[in-house]
Amino acid sequence: MKIAICPGSFDPPTSGHIDIIERASKIFDHLIVTVAINPAKTPLFTIEERVEMLKESTKHLPNVEIDSFQGLLVEYAKKRGAKVIVKGLRAITDFEYEFQMALINKKLAEDIETVFLMTKAEESFLSSSIVKELASLKGNVKGLVPENVEKKLLEKFNLKGR
Ligand code: PNS
């Protein structure tokens, strides 16, 4: 059984994340999408909210599990029996950071491979940060995030009933 881990902050999950998760779920037998608990960051959504949003927006994918983790990703991957880390890659700007992460993870765990799926061209501009900024400025995020996430963003920024 080929188990892969798809880690991220998912603050919040975007349509780009869901696209990568859907495509990865077709490649691997079991895909664990895991939300990183990073005490150094101040996220908009709690871990529980992010896990819940991911569960709701991936409920059509039977081989996808949603979880969270704290600490080193490779340690979590080992614990879960995964040999592959899947990441989405958007543009050149993602490359340097992702390259560094892939190399440090390889250094830490020789037998774990990082694989990258290229984002859809039409979603290559999307990021959780831009979605949060747009929502905070009362911009329309329809289509940029799953519907349940859009609802949560509207609640967060008190834009109910727009
Ligand atoms: O969605 P993001 O913010 O790009 O996700 C980054 C994430 C969570 C995948 C990355 O920060 C991570 O793997 N964090 C866990 C800590 C770790 O293992 N770091 C690498 C070795 S220092």
Image (cartoon, grey):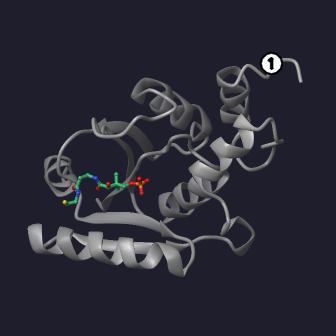
Residue behind mark 1: 160
The quarter of the picture where the N terminus appears is bottom left
Secondary structure type for disc 1: loop
Which residue is found at the position 10% from the left and 67% from the top? Answer: 108
Which residue is found at the position 60% from the left and 70% from the top? Answer: 119
User: Do we see residue 88 in this rendering?
Assistant: yes
Q: Amino acid at mark 1?
A: Lys
The answer to whether 35 appears left or right of 61 in the picture is left
62 over 28 or under it: above or below = above
Which residue is found at the position 53% from the left and 81% from the top? Answer: 92
Q: Residue furthest right?
A: 162
88 over 155 or under it: above or below = below
The quarter of the picture where the C terminus appears is top right
111 over 50 or under it: above or below = below
- Comparing 28 with 151, the one in front is 151
User: Do we see residue 109 in this rendering?
Assistant: no
